[in-house]
Amino acid sequence: MNSRLSSPRINLGFNSFSGLYLLVLFIVVFGIWTPHLFLTLATVQSVAAEQATTAMLAIAVLIPIAAGAYDLSVGATMNLSTIICVWLQTVRGWSMWPAIAVAVGACVVVGVVNGFVIVRLRVNSFIATLGMASVITAVQDIVSGQNQPNPPTTAAWTNLTQLNVAGFQIIVLYLLALALIAWWALDHTPAGRYLYAIGGNPEASRLAGVAVGRYTWYALIASATVSGIAGVFYGSQTGPSLTFGAGLLLPAFAAVFLGSTQINPGRFNVWGTMLAIYVLAVGVKGLQLITGVQWLAEMFNGVALVGAVAFALSRQRLAESRAAGRTDDPVPEVSDSGASPAQEPAPVPSGAGDGG
Amino acid sequence: MARGILTPLPAGGAAEPRPALRIRRLTKSFAGMVALAGFELDIEPGEVHALVGENGSGKSTVIKILAGYHRPGPGGEIEIDGTALPFGSAPAAHAMGCRFVHQDLGLVLQLPVVDNLYLNSGFASRFGTIREARTRRQASELLRRVGLDVDPRTVVATLPLAQRTGVAVARALQGEDHDQVRLLVLDEPTATLPENEVHQLLGMIRQVAADGVAVLYVSHRLDEIFRVADNVTVLRDGHRVATVPVSSLDKRRLVSLLVGDELGELPSPGPGGSGGVGAALSVQGLRGPGVTGVTFRARPGEIVGFAGITGSGRESLLGMVFGAVRRLGGVVEAGGRPLPPYDPRAAIAAGLAYLPPDRKTTGAMMDLSARENLSICGLRSFWSGLLLRRTAERAEARQWFDRLGVRPAGATEKQLATFSGGNQQKVLFAKWLRLSPTVFLLDEPTQGVDVGTKAELHRQLLSAAAGGSTILVSSSDLEELTALCHRVLVLRAGRVAAELGSSSVTTASISRASLGGPEVLTA
């Protein structure tokens, strides 16, 4: 039994990887439909790069949500970072690195304030960060005077994200690095475990000696910091805009929730989130190539967010009813332990249709 | 749907009276595994029939089939008052007069009794407006049927637990026609009740039965069965082991039927507290919610029990010692060092362990795996080279699974929520045992846990005590206290009212001391 249990935790079951199969399906269907447009390396490269900042923002959403705290200010924080960084360079004539440092530093402050309001003042995270988003937008208007600053023209600034690495923009590598770090922090450090424990049951975590307030605070600072970094990259890749942040918030949340049904179902996780981002992106891209309409992204993201949450809830209900049946039934225990012992919580066998 | 009055009496000379509940050849399998095999049961009107068995023996399966939640295998029959019960339909079960009260009562605590009674079935109303006076009269009538004398306007949260259960029973019995109720199923109604309230609830149950209702009573507390039931059916591994009149049994015999083992005896403590002279834990003048001043000391190796009725301060005492609940005054010293008033981390660092009374809300992260729950307090030992060493973590979790006999064996990666209650409790025990604490604070440690698991947990506690740990047990289960403790402190009105040494600890002496003196009744 021991050897069976310590086998690597890889399970290519539909339950954990339905998104991957959906991705393959998209690629096959769109590939057959419009081979000359869709099945090109250029499409792969552009989708990978276009989604990189959204994916980073999704990581920013993911970290506090693991601990049960919603950070709705990430979009505004990201936008603030872009504007500060660009404004310092083009309006105040700063060089790139100090401007980046100040922009990200400002976002760290946002995280600290979020943490203070949520942990110390005990304001519900939803309310606190919703309010914070509004305050940040106001601060951004003060800084910029509501004038969109011109993008810096230095090569260093554009190369920061658009440098070509094997055909891909270098920002794709940044995303990969960031995802690896987030995965390590959430899945392979005590801090990450504490965050999931807090998300699971804050009071039980406190009674087990977890510093609930402190780790929630850390998570919110990490979230704002990642948002700030994503904002700098957005400025370099796409150029400054006064309003883009709010529009990225929903796709990021959709990816995080959809991602919680993937890879490690029932838990907010990094690779599930990344998978979700790109499944959605490929679906949108393919349909746009075919139909040429622009509203697809919004439609997809909205449906994905609500669908993923509904799906996760139904999965939870099923797991609960099974657990309830179990309290006195010897039976499912046996059947389950035989099925997939190495898998993390795999509550539902029928992981079929998900929100995508 | 036949009303009581219209039901034809059995024809004269009929061989036997028709039972209220008649179950024949009931089987149920899950995924090819037998949960229930050829189960049979008869309950006469007015009979209280206890159904006992360890966790996993099939009790819940029987109840869930009755309630229309599960469908039985082919060949099974259930008759209610002579009429076949259609399977798999909750409304049908209800229409035929089956009523269920679960351990989770499903009451809205913030609302008055009367609202709780009629939320489901609808209020007496005229033109959509609730007729307050009439509804209240009906409610009082209903409450009297279960022998409950409370004002229907009382908010449920202010009632003692037994009376809340009574309200749930009353709600189950109500309907447009009371005579419809044939069968009342009570699933562990006393799991969280203190001794004196159990008495009150058992009285209510007898009253309901006296009205001609058949009562199926499920409980882990064996002494209650002797007090309330006429007959008892014992289930083991899905098989009916025995159906016997309670009067023909004694407790020892019942335990051996349950465990299937003549040696199924609960362990008992050795001569405790010999370990050291100094106090491992010293509490002076402790004050806080419900506690007005408690002072005691406990030596290494000693098992100290805490008893007391609801509101005596017993419920919050251990949480306050640990720092789970903020204490308002007094000093708690562990190993001679004072503990801060509201800081579980400091308490754990000082060698304390605390098992809260309610697994779901404060005890465990139900959505996390058993392994993650087990290791949460001591993750540092798996943290090396910038990685949490999951292989080592899993190996240790498996060791604890083996040591405590957690079922399913080796399933350390499964969500804690998917384990049965007793196994969840074992995992939470292991979580603290692995830290080798010097002081265990245990609130209702074996609540809703079957006899076998309870014995296993008690064995672990006794061995921890033998190893020099101090163990404080707060429990509403007096048998547990008498079986386990070297001495028992009885709380009353927020203070220690009596201390019972090992020679004088009996359930009766604890009960007496708990109630002692002039009782202040809360209306």
Image (cartoon, grey):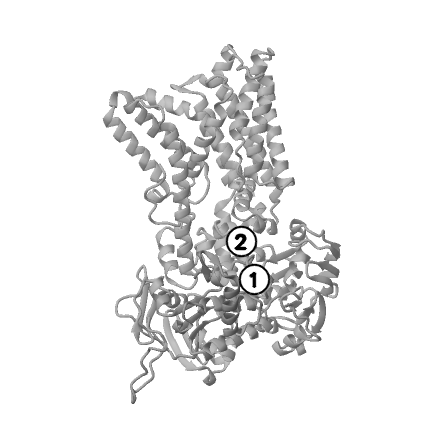
Relative to residue B523, is residue B338 drawn left or right? right
Judge whether B467 appears above or below A287 on screen: below
Within 10 Å of disc 1 (Cα), the crowding (few <14, some 14-19, many 20+) is many
Coordinates of residue A227 in the picture (x, y in percent): 53, 28
Whole-number angstrom distance, CA of label 2 to CA of label 1: 27 Å
Same chain for the residues at labels 2 and 1, yes or no? yes
Within 10 Å of disc 2 (Cα), the crowding (few <14, some 14-19, many 20+) is many
* Quadrant occupied by the N terminus of chain A: bottom left
Coordinates of residue A81 in the picture (x, y in percent): 55, 23
- Dot 2 amino acid type: Ala
Chain letter for the residue marked with disc 2 in the picture: B
Chain letter for the residue marked with disc 1 in the picture: B
Count of number-bearing discs? 2
- Dot 1 amino acid type: Val
Judge whether B505 appears above or below A200 on screen: below
Pick the front one: A131 or B244: A131
Q: Dividing the picture into quarters, in which one does residue A286 lie?
A: top left
Disc 1 element:
helix
Judge whether A269 appears above or below B33 on screen: above
- Indicate which disc, 2 or 1, sits on the residue closer to the N terminus: 1
Q: Using the rendered image of the protein, determine whether residue A39 is visible from the camera's viewpoint.
A: no
Residue depicted at 59% across the width and 51% down the height: A208
Q: Dividing the picture into quarters, in which one does residue A110 lie?
A: top right
Judge whether A20 appears above or below B350 on screen: above
Pick the front one: A300 or B427: A300
Q: Name the residue that disc number 2 marks.
A: B364
Q: Name the residue that disc number 1 marks.
A: B156
Disc 2 element:
loop
Coordinates of residue A189 in the picture (x, y in percent): 54, 40
Q: Which mark is residue B382?
A: none
